[in-house]
Image (cartoon, rainbow, N blue to C red):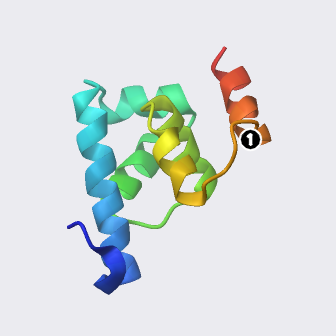
Amino acid sequence: MDNWLFLTEQEILKEIGKRLKKIRLQHNLTQKEMSEEVGLSVSTISLIESGKSTTVESLIRILVRLNRIKDFESVFRVGENLELKLKFEKAKL
C-alpha cells in the first residue's frame, strides 16, 4: 500500500509492522536477536510486527538497528544535528 491517506490508524500500524518485519528478515535477524539488540522484549517486537501500537522510542530503537532512521528523519525533515540521533549513536557504541 503506497497511499496511507485513506487507511485507518489500525491499518497503518499493520502496514508499519509488516514492513518492519520484512526489513528485519532482510537483515537475517530473529525477533529474539532484534529484541536483545534494541533492548525490547520479544513480545514487544512481535506486537509491533503484528500491527499493535508502540511507543515512538521503541520504533526509533528498531529503526536505528535496521539502519532506517533516515526514513523516519525525512518524515519530519529534521537537521543532522538532532540530539536524539546523537544519543542513540552513542548508545550503539
Q: Is residue 73 left or right of residue 15?
A: right
> In this view, which residue lies farthest toward the top?
93
Which of the image's four quarters has the N terminus?
bottom left
Which corner quadrant of the image does residue 5 belong to?
A: bottom left
Could you tell me the amino acid type at mark 1?
Leu
Q: Residue at x 28, y 51 (%)?
A: 19
Q: Which residue is mark 1?
A: 84
Query: Vertically, is 75 above or below 79?
Result: below
Q: Is residue 62 left or right of residue 3?
A: right
Q: Position of residue 56 (x, y in %)?
A: 60, 57
Residue 87 in sight:
yes
Which corner quadrant of the image does residue 33 belong to?
A: top left
Q: Position of residue 27 (x, y in %)?
A: 29, 26
Q: Position of residue 70 (x, y in %)?
A: 51, 40
SS class, disc 1: helix
Q: Please tell me which residue lies in front, 75 or 88.
A: 75
Query: Vertically, is 42 above or below 50?
Result: above
Q: Please tell me which residue lies in front, 60 or 1.
A: 1
Query: Vertically, is 52 above or below 22?
Result: below
Query: Vertically, is 13 above or below 29?
Result: below
Q: Residue at x 29, y 30 (%)?
A: 30
